Image (spheres, rainbow, N blue to C red):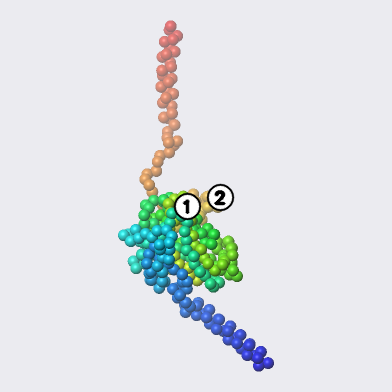
Amino acid sequence: MQRVTAQLVAWLLAALLSLLAEQCWADGGGPSLSERVIWAVNAGGEAHIDMHGIHFKKDPLEGKVGKASDYGVRLPILRSSPEDQILYQTERYNEDTFGYEIPIREEGDYILVMKYAEVYFAQSQQKVFDVRLNGHVVVKDLDIFERVGHSTAHDEIVPFSIRRGKLSVHGEVSTFNGKLNVEFVKGYYDNPKICALYVMKGTSEDVPKLQPHPGLEKREEEEEEEEDSEGGEEGGKKSASAAPKYRVQSGPRTPNPYAADNSSLMFPILVAFGVFIPTLFCLCRL
């Protein structure tokens, strides 16, 4: 009887400690952001500790795969804090598909954060590539310039989970062997690249947000309005009645050529008629 009582007390104590731990997490007393990061690399660059305390290691692919570039250090990177711009100024690229292997030993919910900035090309459709996670395409046709423009920070955030030996990402499931393979897939336009990346425990809401960019916010609002106005006849009516909030006018409206006065169409007919009558009169006299 005493043994059963002791086991019951131990079980109740464990349950209480679990509840207290969850409450501490909810109250902000859980692991910090940097403590939840299990792996981080500054691609093409040296080790760096960012403003959130995340320790980015020196690129382990140095001298092995691809090429490192610091071309971006001459440029200020928009949307990034000054002390962390180096994470977007250096990069690793390769003329073929390449990637990183990340060991993950515990089950749970994770986030892959990939940092990018286009510091070379000045227009879209110059560098376009995919990103795969253990064979699953998680980013399709990534065109950094198309997304944010030149020398501007851009983060790709991919949530995934590992449970019972299975990897779940974007609704797809595959067997997980303890290693996460992040691949940057060679496409038709130039070479794939990465500036920095890290994996952390948590959800998308836990990822630090980049600084606001007015131009991007306006474009996102326009896209949201367009999406809201799609879908059936009612959507078409909304699209016709609600103009985009930040649409830029390109100049005066072109006149409608079909709205001109119809009297102008009678002029050629009158001229032809005026020529025909004298000609007919002359022929009759002959």
* Front label number (2 vs 1): 1
Q: Of all residues shown, which one is farthest toward the bottom?
A: 2
Which residue lies at the image location 45% right of the left edge and 9% below the top edge? 284
Q: Quadrant of the N terminus?
A: bottom right
Amino acid type of the residue tagged 2 in the rendering: Glu
Amino acid type of the residue tagged 1 in the rendering: Gly
Instruction: Say if 251 sits above or below 84 in the image.
Output: above
Q: Nearer the viewer, residue 249 or 107?
A: 107
Image-based side of 247 in relation to 22, left or right = left
Helix, strand or loop at mark 2: helix
Residue labelled with disc 2: 233
Q: Position of residue 26 (x, y in %)?
A: 50, 77
Rendered image: mark on residue 176: none
Residue labelled with disc 1: 187
Does residue 244 show up? no
Residue 41 falls in which quadrant of the image?
A: bottom left
Crowding around mark 1 (Cα neighbors within 10 Å: few <14, some 14 to 19, many 20+) is some
User: Which mark is first along the chain, 1 or 2?
Assistant: 1
Helix, strand or loop at mark 1: strand
Q: Nearer the viewer, residue 110 or 257?
A: 110
Residue 51 falls in which quadrant of the image?
A: bottom left
Q: Of all residues shown, which one is farthest toward the front?
A: 63
Q: Position of residue 149 (x, y in %)?
A: 39, 55
Which residue lies at the image location 51% right of the left edge and 63% below the top edge? 181
Q: Of all residues shown, which one is farthest toward the top?
A: 286
Does residue 98 show up? yes
